[in-house]
Image: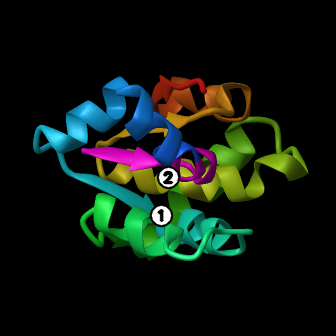
Amino acid sequence: MIHFDTNALVALPQWARDGNEVVKRVVAGEAAAACVVVWYEFLLGPLADDEAELAHAFIGGRVEPMTEADAELGARLFNACGRRRTLKTDALIAATAIRAKADFVTLNVADFKPFVAHGLRLVPASL
């Protein structure tokens, strides 16, 4: 399972053109998803006309809801990683990927690196 960060969803069209390894994994049959917070951020756009539909199809329609367990783990991650205001949303996103036992793909490696020690399987990506 692969979970995508917002910036990774934005990068999908370019990655598909370039033959990115993460795209190849999904095309080969590995499940992909985005948590509801990532999906919300992505939909804020700006997006091209059919970009949301294509991204939704690419992840197989799997927009993961936030659960009570995610909220609890997200709070633990936030507290364990220094309680920086910039980590609030990222802690929730990381918690969802950890719960799903998913690889987490992001262009913002530095933002999510603090969560690796707590179980996040971070997959650095680039354009």
Which quadrant of the rendered structure holds the N terminus? top left
Q: On the image, which quarter does residue 24 sit in?
A: top left
Q: Residue at x 71, y 74 (%)?
A: 44
Taking the image as shown, residue 123 lies to the left or right of residue 1, namely: right
Check if mark 2's residue and mark 1's residue have beta carbons within 8 Å: yes
Q: Residue at x 48, y 28 (%)?
A: 122
Q: Residue at x 31, y 59 (%)?
A: 58
Q: Dot 1: few (<14), some (14–19), or many (≥20) neighbours within 10 Å?
A: many
Name which of mark 2 and mark 1 comes first in the sequence: 1
Residues 95 and 108: in front is 108
Residue type at numbered disc 2 = Ala
Please, is residue 126 above or below residue 111 in the view? above
Marker disc for residue 38: none
Q: On the image, which quarter does residue 108 sit in?
A: top right
Q: Which residue is mark 1?
A: 70
Please, is residue 11 above or below residue 53 in the view? above
Taking the image as shown, residue 26 lies to the left or right of residue 103, namely: left
Residue type at numbered disc 1 = Asp
Q: Which residues are magenta?
A: 1-10
Look at the numbered disc 2 and give the secondary structure of its residue: helix
Marker disc for residue 95: 2
Residues 75 and 21: in front is 21
Look at the numbered disc 1 and give the secondary structure of its residue: helix
Q: Point out residue 69 in the picture as x, y percentages from the top left corner.
A: 43, 66
